[in-house]
Amino acid sequence: MRSDFADAAGTYDSAAVLAREVGARMAARLDLVKIAPQRIADIGCATGDGIRDLQKRYPKALPFAIDFALPMLQAVRQATPRLQRLTGRGSRLINADVRRLPLASNSFGLVWSNLMLHWLDDPLPALKELHRVLEVGGLLSFATLGPDTLKELRAAAEKVGAGELSMPGKALRAPATARRFLDMHDLGDMLVAAGFGDPVMDMEMITLTYAAPRAFLSDQRRLGVREALLGRQPWRDWRRLFQQWERDAEQRLPASFEIVYGHAWKPEPKQLADGRAVIKFQSR
């Protein structure tokens, strides 16, 4: 999948309608919290829309753009204004896997991740790593795809007897039609298991429409997620499935995406690294 994302760096922006919309809605949620982070990180930054928006919101913070596909980071660099590069205010670019971040512990006030975590078979190691790099009182804000994503395509698959990808971490049944994603309750449990306190989760459906199946497939290819999202099937089988994809009242093909939003804070530790409990006393 890394190579698919890397190959899509040049076409990503032309198809990233959903990512931009979700990013804007994530940013609106930040209006509800009062933070002044000194360091901010966009994990899975793609071509950099998210980190640029965060820089405008928190101009005094030191920005980090992190992605495991190097060409995506090169696109971030190319889009960085020359003045920012000359003054050292551009994003620090880091080519890394979210599960093994070359970042100091307790060093970020805000970690942001837009539509990246759902590509991991098991997000828990990544959430633990994000907890590690956040400072106490730091905020994690993320969005992922939920299990009702592409429900129209799943309904069409059932009509023609096609299979589907199972939940992340489980065995694959062939033929594959569409990847399944974790629901927000499972993600909330994972946040608690990773050490976060009182996570807040919510979801909404966003529906894009397409004039024809090829337009939908083209978008997924330009985003670099076609195979990861849809799996592989012969074109003959895809044609059978697409014939059962029900059109809406305007004769367009609806593609619904369940967006799961989460934010959680890193609380004060309850014990030290050596296992000793932390007990605080307050004077009256």
Image: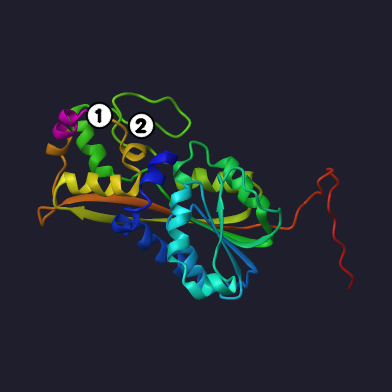
Residue 212 in view: yes
Say which amino acid is labelled 2.
Leu
Q: Report the residue marked by disc 1.
A: 233
Tell me where residue 242 appears, x and y as whole percent: 16, 38
The image shows residue 149, relative to residue 201, as above or below, that is above
Residue drawn at point x = 48 percent, y = 72 percent:
82
Rendered image quadrant of residue 275:
top right
Rendered image quadrant of residue 151:
top left
Say which amino acid is labelled 1.
Gln
- 201 left or right of 214 in image: right
The image shows residue 275, relative to residue 108, as above or below, that is above
Q: CA distance from mark 2 to mark 1?
A: 12 Å
User: Tag 2's secondary structure?
Assistant: loop
Residue 182 in view: no
Tell me where residue 152 appears, x and y as whole percent: 23, 43
As drawn, the residue found furthest toward the right would be 283
Q: Quadrant of the N terminus?
A: top left
2 and 1 marks in contact (CB < 8 Å): no
- 268 left or right of 78 in image: right
On whether residue 239 falls in the magenta region, the answer is yes
Residue drawn at point x = 86 percent, y = 67 percent:
282
- 21 left or right of 114 in image: left
Q: Report the residue marked by disc 2.
A: 165
Which stretch appears magenta?
233-240
- Give the mark, 2 or 1, whose residue is nearer the N terminus: 2
Residue drawn at point x = 22 percent, y = 32 percent:
158
